Image: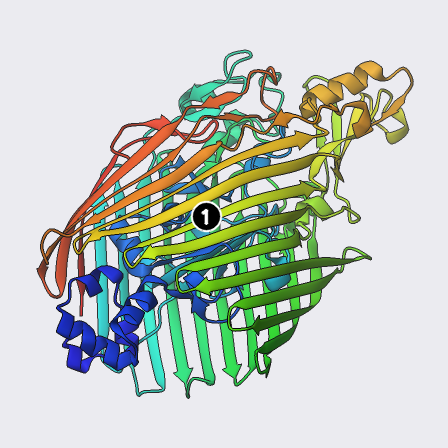
Amino acid sequence: MEISEMTKKDVLNLTYDQLLELPFEDLLKLAEILGVSPDELYEIILNKDLVSASKKVESSFESPLSSSVISHDEIVESGARTIEEALRLIPGLLIREKTNGNFDVHIRGNDNLPPYQMLLYSENSITLVMIDSRPVYNYAHGGTFWETLPVDIDDIDRIEVVRGPSSALYGPNAVSGVVNIITRGQEDTKLSVHAGLQGGTQNTAITNLSIGKGINHKFSFRITGNFQLMNRNTDKVYVHKANGGTGGYLSLEELDTIHDPYYPSYYVFDPADDVYEMFPDPRKSRQRYGVNTYLMYNVNDDIAFDLKAGYQNSEVISSTMGDNPMSVVGRISNTTYIDLNGKVNGLHAQVNLLNGWQDIILGDTGFKVDIINLNSNLEYDIFLGNFNLRPGFSYQLASYDDLPYLRREGQGFLNGKRSFITTALSLRADYLAFEKLRFIGAIRGEKFSTHENIYISYQMVTSYTLNSRHNFRFVHSRANRGPFMVDTYADYYWFRDERPDPGYILFNGQKNLNFLSMCMMELGYRIKPIKKIQADVELFFSKTRDFGALYPDSVNLNGAQFGLDRPWVRMTYKNIDLESQQYGITGSVSFIIREDLVIKVHGTYQQTYLKNVIPYTQAQTIILMLEEAGSDTVTYSSTNFTEDREDIVNRATPSIFGSLSVQYKPTEKLSINVNGYFYSKQEFSSKYLQNINDPVIIEPKAIVNLKIGYSLFDFLDININTRNILGAKQEFGYMDDIGAIILIGMNFGF
């Protein structure tokens, strides 16, 4: 586009690299369009605006929280295949690949807690993921099913991440932070079309198509579609106790030959009958498609509305969310959403609805559910000079129903339609003193229909901008998690016919659980010593408590009183005394070496210490209780099994992880991007360990990616994209070895 035709939005969409390539006279013209000096123009482009840190537009340099933003162009240039993989570009995020294209995502860590539990406790249930501030959370077990996001990279304008407790701003489950995916709008009245295609090894196919048009200067629309297909590099699944005591990888044919009812004791179904239902295609790692429609009506800067709707269908093979003998299982999701967002002067309103169904463990009875999630939020900005007050109200409904998919009542976790309602009042105050010193306070009170108490989250921030080169911040915050369906409403029993004692296990949820909470203190500093260098460092300390997990409640050697002829165990979701304390530092630096070379590096060092650890698996605890049963009934008490040492290190989170990215453009048409991600050694502890002192060791790994792109024409470019070129190695306990992928792609657009 000619500079004379560019609008303010066009200028703001330029990258720092593009600015550096321009002659000085063109730079002056762009600065004139924005009404700033050339130096100020560099500053605006280098520090992209974000809104997630304080719910108002501000540069990333002035953000009062530890936050980062990556743009659409950065994601595309990196060669990332999925949104999760793109998050490796952001400081403080721990990203590990389980199966091809399916990732585990944590902010700073605190994963695999409590230890010696089911694999689902390694899932991240304490980070809130949103699309345009719409929560996309799994309320069955907690966390995010990333494959169910209907959008793909082509839909994204930018991704904003806030590290640290943020429930005071965004509600429950934003315990360790927030990932907010901001979708692209339509910039002008011209017709825009974009299509992208990548294909390569492991049967990989990734396609995107988008069409946008501005009807006039106020009303515009975009329609997008995306598709992903990725295969595993094996057709085997990891089975615990596969060889009479040790775990191993078996093909479905090998698994189908197992008929010994005592092998393994975890089976809740006959593998000979159900294994092929769980893995109709054991090589297919990820298959998903989504369509989205965006309607935008902008009257002016103060009045705007947008309506978004979409559909997704996804199928993955990834880590199990249940108590299965296999570590990986199939999962299918089919959902639609609609999201209405409006702004009228200082009033901000948003309401959205998601419905559909999910089969969380394909082929296993009781895990298929219908879903309805409704979220609404209303906030109002009051400005009094340098003082901004923002009161708010929110309402949330989550409803899950497994009854339509049960052969008989009692086979499911919920055995009917279960729901909970969350209402909240919030207040945020922001005061700027002396144009340099900023004070922010936020508080939120939440009432859950499953609990009598009101839960309070808060955030207190002090930010000081010494000048355009130095910014300091201090944060103290608290956040809590909300209720999950299984933890709250579980009500089912397991008859263990022909299996070792106990012969019966009863599972129960609990409505009076305390919610996991995190308190954090953080000190941050941003510096720009010269125009071409920017650095950020953050020191953090957090304390997490009120963990919940499924533990035996009582054992009974005589089941006759219940009409049972064998010993039974009652399992209940309950709070335990475990406490996690994390200390760490994250640093990031961006170097503009010269006009055609940009280097970005970030790294995190952390240590997590655990108090009041229960050093037994569920099975070991049950055995100890059975041995202790001198009478008919023994009741569980966590204090009987707790290890009092306070210096236990949680080695499930690697002590060091980070990323390096190098962008080189030797010519106007040729671009070369080399990026790498690394993490140190880690130890994975689950209930399947034969000996808790012998955890699964995940060796250190360096991941190196290379993407080379060449622009044939203004509307067409081609690229070669190689991922993980150093070779295959496991990144997550009991999952696949993740190896190299080679892709060839092209992008077409005007």
Q: Residues within 10 Å of mark 1 (few under 14, many from 20)?
A: many
Q: Is residue 36 visible?
A: yes
Front-most of residues 331 and 198: 198
Q: Position of residue 179 (x, y in %)?
A: 48, 55
Front-most of residues 723 and 562: 723
Q: Which residue is mark 1?
A: 537
Residue 505 vertical placement versus 229 (above, below): above
Q: Judging from the image, what secondary structure is the residue with disc 1 in?
A: strand
Residue in the picture at 53% in, 45% down: 539
Horizontal placement of 6 versus 472: left or right?
Answer: left
Amino acid at pointer 1: Val
Residue in the picture at 73% in, 29% down: 612
Residue 541 falls in which quadrant of the image? Answer: top right
Residue in the picture at 56% in, 16% down: 694
Residue 491 falls in which quadrant of the image? Answer: top right
Query: Which quadrant of the rendered structure holds the C terminus?
Result: bottom left
User: Which color mode does the image show?
Assistant: rainbow
Q: Position of residue 282 (x, y in %)?
A: 39, 33
Residue 504 vertical placement versus 281 (above, below): above
Residue in the picture at 77% in, 23% down: 641
Q: Position of residue 611 (x, y in %)?
A: 70, 30
Query: Which quadrant of the rendered structure holds the N terminus?
Result: bottom left
